[in-house]
Amino acid sequence: MSAQKIVHLPTSTEVEQAKISSRTLSKYANVERVQLSLLGSNGESDELVLPGHVLQMLLDVLSETSKGNAISLIPHHQEVSTQEAANLLNVSRPFLVGLLEKGEVPFRKVGAHRRVLLTDVLAYREKTEQLRSKALDELVALSQDEGMGY
């Protein structure tokens, strides 16, 4: 898969088509695989089989499209720039660079540029979400112990 950046905001017609398609496909969300019949506007037709996890990804794409959102698909082995990694973590690029330099997230240098594996960015995000959740649970427990009504 190429790393080209193509942003397409769905049209109102595409949003409606995505809503209808999503509702139809959602009936098959928990199956091991699904067979599809395709009929293109050019008259071509084909049959294909999708594994269940691919169908789930397609449902995710349709769900976002039905909300009018553009989406990106990035392979897990893909390297991303510091700006892309910062965007995924919802932090500033300088903050991310600090994390890289402290060794919190592995990276490699390509010339003067840092590159980060998407899997490492996602692992860091998961780790911080777990820590955040644990801290919130502890705050709730403390508040209940103190009778603060939470």
Image (cartoon, rainbow, N blue to C red):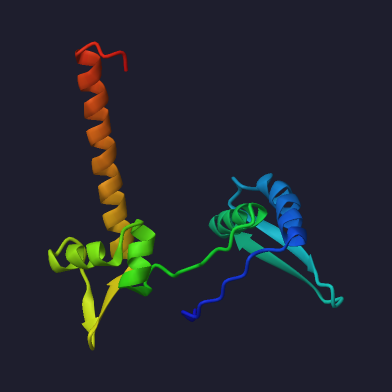
Quarter assignment of residue 35 = bottom right
Residue 64 can be seen, yes or no: yes
Residue 118 can be seen, yes or no: no
The residue that appears at 62% across and 62% down in the rendered structure is 50
Quarter assignment of residue 21 = bottom right
Residue 129 image offset from top left, x and y in percent: 30, 45
Q: Is residue 133 above or below residue 148?
A: below
Q: Nearer the viewer, residue 139 or 24?
A: 139
Q: What is the total number of numbered labels drawn onto the structure image?
A: 0
Using residue 3 as the reference point, say whether residue 81 is left or right of it: left
Q: Quadrant of the C terminus?
A: top left
Q: Residue furthest left?
A: 102
Residue 17 image offset from top left, x and y in percent: 76, 57
Residue 44 image offset from top left, x and y in percent: 83, 77
The residue that appears at 12% across and 64% down in the rendered structure is 102
Q: Residue furthest bottom?
A: 111
Using residue 144 as the reference point, say whether residue 63 is left or right of it: right
Q: Residue furthest right?
A: 43
Residue 134 image offset from top left, x and y in percent: 24, 35
Q: Is residue 93 above or below residue 33?
A: below
The residue that appears at 49% across and 79% down in the rendered structure is 1
Q: Residue furthest top?
A: 147
The residue that appears at 21% across and 64% down in the rendered structure is 105
